[in-house]
Amino acid sequence: MEYEILLLGSLTLIYLLALLYWVFLKDLINGLNLSSFGQVKKFYTRVSSYGDVTLMGNGKGSIFRSINGNLAVGSFIIFFLALIGAYWFLFRDLKPNSLDQGFSISGPNDATGQCNVFDGKWVPHDGYPLYNASDCPFAELGFNCLANGRNDKAYLKWRWKPKNCEIPSFDAEALLKYLRNKRVVFVGDSLTRTQWESFICMLMSGGVDKRFVYEINQNKISKEIRFLNVRFDSYNFTVEFYRSTYLVWQTTPPKRAPKRVKSTLRLDKMDNVNEEWINSDVLIFNTGHWWTKTKLFETGTYFQVGTSLKLGMPVSKALTKALETWASWVESKINHNKTHVFFRTFEASHWSGRNRNKCKLSRRPMLTTQGKDRSPVSDVILRVIKSMSAPVTALHVTPMGAYRSDAHVGTYGDNPSVPDCSHWCLPGLPDMWNEILFTYLLHKDEISRQQISK
């Protein structure tokens, strides 16, 4: 709507300027006394002749007699050219670009000259939401904000728009066919579980028979379950979630450790269930929200490398070491001819107040990121991925989430007395992460051909 208003205002202004130009120029020419110019009159008469018609003539062909008509035509031409220019200026970024016009999935350090899908803005879209969480048995109640009493639905109507391309419309049926006989694995914290739930609910919007979509162990979706596996029987594929908040192994402390040490993170060893992740076709990682002093040191969790405790190691250094261990694991354990590896960066939260314990939801996306488009955790993730020899796609969602203070759970979780400005409502923002993921999976061949041809 803002573009339509801007265009209407611009065209009105252009037309008024053209009209003023016509009136002013007409009066100026009619008011000229060219006889006062002396020798200039002769020169002007000579150079202004056009065929049998001259500006200075008094006969039948005098242009002065038709000056109003000529000015009207000229004004119309100027207005028409201005209209084309205004349209190009206002709508050049809104014109959809197909894959053949340079669409690609790229990270923040894209060097291909193609579109970076993570650089853009949120725009209203009537095609959302893509599903109803109350109709999806795998969307947990804590993320179903509408079911928990949220009345405003404006947060459901926004879609991410990259600056220089379009993200193709979500096609559940195409994705279901693509995933036939495959295995999708999500590994990470509760934000990853949210994305996993969104992934399944989006797939179920493709008209699959719910009787043939089930959790293989009949587990109820909750934060306490460490492993969840939903099977789509009709297409013979699974979508799995492994809760691994740090990605590395959390274990008991070594002997003679200080009493305050209740557990340690083995920064040099992957989570002890890592073998379960290897034989997958799509593998998505995430970590970050548990790498804080509060969730580590105040719970008695410290760092360890080999047999050595690292009690004074900063969290940022420990995170870097853990991700380097992850990177080595990906490079040595994963068959990249089979498995597509993704890593989603840190998701912005919007806590406020002096102690960062207040959660006030906005009514619409913020106009600025207020500095939340950058994150030290994301910077470490991107730096490690960039240094890897193995192909890993960074889903750099930090900037897009920075605008969405309206999309958090807030007080519309399963426990209204505990506000939540970290997690997201479903349907909502995590659906956009998956749309970008789906785009890569469904169009990777076209993307590869474009990058090769560069």
Image (tube, rainbow, N blue to C red):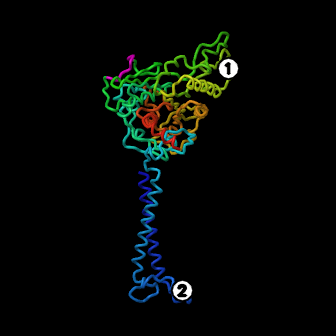
Q: Nearer the viewer, mark 2 or mark 1?
A: 2
Kind of residue indicated by mark 2: Phe
- The picture places residue 100, in percent across and down from the top left corner, at 44, 45
- The picture places residue 417, in percent across and down from the top left corner, at 46, 27
From mark 2 to mark 1, how far is it between C-alphas? 94 Å
Compare marks 2 and 1 and give the one earlier in the sequence.
2
- The magenta-colored residue range is 212-218
Question: Which of 143 and 363 lies nearest the eye of the viewer?
Answer: 143
Determine which of the numbered discs, if any, sits on residue 47 in the image. Answer: none
Kind of residue indicated by mark 1: Leu
Determine which of the numbered discs, if any, sits on residue 311 in the image. Answer: 1
Q: Residues within 10 Å of mark 1 (few under 14, many from 20)?
A: some
Residue farthest front in this picture: 453
Above or below for 11 versus 124: below
> Which image quarter: residue 317?
top right
Question: Which of 142 and 162 lies nearest the eye of the viewer?
Answer: 162
Above or below for 205 versus 298: below
Looking at the rendered structure, the secondary structure element under dot 1 is loop
Q: Residue at x 45, y 72 (%)?
A: 20
Above or below for 446 versus 54: above
Looking at the rendered structure, the secondary structure element under dot 2 is helix
Q: Is residue 335 visible?
A: yes
Q: Residues within 10 Å of mark 2 (few under 14, many from 20)?
A: few
- The picture places residue 207, in percent across and down from the top left corner, at 31, 31
- The picture places residue 169, in percent across and down from the top left corner, at 39, 40
**Which residue in the structure is indicated by mark 2?**
43
Q: Is residue 188 visible?
A: no
Indicate left or right for 194 with 207 as reference.
right
Question: Which of 445 and 371 lies nearest the eye of the viewer?
Answer: 445
Q: Residue at x 43, y 61 (%)?
A: 84
Residue farthest top in this picture: 255
